[in-house]
Image (cartoon, rainbow, N blue to C red):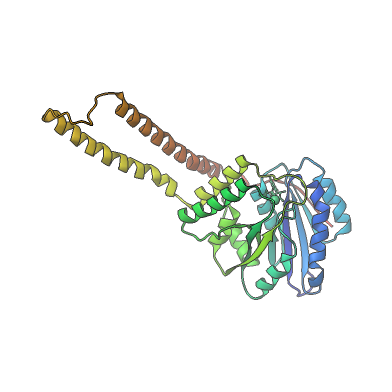
Amino acid sequence: MADSARPTFSIVVPLYNEAENVAPLLARISAAIEPIRAQFDHEIVLVNDGSTDGTLAAIRAEMRRHTQTVLVNLSRNFGHQLAATAGIEIATGDAVILMDGDLQDPPELIEDFLRKWREGHDVVYAVRRTRKGESRFKLWTARAFYRIIKRLTKIAIPLDTGDFRLMSRRAVEAVRRLPERHRFLRGMVSWVGFDQVAIEYDRDVRYAGETKYPLSKMLRFAMDGITSFSDVPLRFASYFGFAVSVIAFVYAVIVIVMKTFSLKPAFYTPGWASTIVAVLFLGGVQLMSLGILGEYLGRVYDEVKGRPLYIISDIERS
Ligand code: UDP
Ligand code: MG
């Protein structure tokens, strides 16, 4: 790709069933990088994440029109974070820009990313000032999620930031050294450190097609984010256990005192109400604690298996 001393950048786009978006995406990327063509060499890495619609054909058609395009075909659908990881690992640029394929991340920002990078920043991430066309529910849950994860983790994961960002070569190499399979890339990039800077943008509506993140996947992803960066939930069980033990101890003392002195104050009514409440409460706490353990244990199991993160079936270049 690079034959000169010009710096190169790679644009990495994971695509899953985005047939109608491929052509408009490449057109907009091309237009956006037109003004900087003289300054930089570039490549566009399109990762086809096991699409079942016409995405592959659409990419191949576009590759005839656009040179410097790399198609990475995964052997099946591995999910957004792993497809993005595959793209980042294939990309060869001095800087790597990750963006969604549905034009929610405006390619016009690439120029700003590159400017910040040339000023010496290692990571330039795009913060959503506004998000158009998202449901109230998604906006609210996303907002809550970013604030919860901020409280639970020690590393500063920026609020309201997706994966749309530029990474310098050394930041990319650092992220590549994090081998985890339940990936929360935005957190991992924060974790590696270096000089990180934000730029604000207005998130557009999806150009065509439907979101590939239904609620169930969003919840999984949120759990991945929390479990990857915090062990606080694991300690909930101890906190609960401690609190319940203290209450139980106090209650036991009261009961013993009452029995010893044959006291029967007004609030003392023998019956199942207090018993059933205690049983249900403890049962709930125990099941929840087991569930939290399970979330972590399942992830430990996945890590221990040591399977590759993704399988590439082939790579084509234009
Ligand atoms: N994506 C992917 N594999 C998946 C799901 C999504 O490669 O299993 C891609 C998708 O094609 C898009 C990006 O990840 O380019 C973000 O997905 P989407 O726009 O559906 O997420 P949302 O913006 O709704 O959060
Ligand atoms: Mg989207």
Residue 166 seen anywhere in this rendered image of the structure: no
x, y percentage for residue 189? Answer: 58, 60
Residue 230 seen anywhere in this rendered image of the structure: yes
Q: Nearer the viewer, residue 170 or 290?
A: 290
- Which residue occupies the extreme left position in the image? 261
x, y percentage for residue 179? Answer: 57, 52
In this picture, is 127 found above or below 225? below
Residue at the spot x=22%, y=29% of the render?
268
Q: Nearer the viewer, residue 148 or 217?
A: 148
In this picture, is 2 found above or below 85? below
x, y percentage for residue 142? Answer: 58, 50
x, y percentage for residue 160? Answer: 59, 57
Q: Is residue 192 left or right of residue 44?
A: left
Q: Is residue 264 left or right of residue 36?
A: left
In this picture, is 159 found above or below 287? below
In this picture, is 208 found above or below 1? above
Number of marks in the rendered image: 0
Q: Which corner quadrant holds the N terminus?
A: bottom right
Q: Nearer the viewer, residue 148 or 73?
A: 148
Residue at the spot x=57%, y=43% of the render?
219
Quarter residue 13 falls in? bottom right
Residue at the spot x=57%, y=48% of the render?
141
- Which residue occupies the extreme front position in the image? 266
Residue at the spot x=55%, y=62% of the render?
192
Q: Which corner quadrant holds the C terminus?
A: bottom right
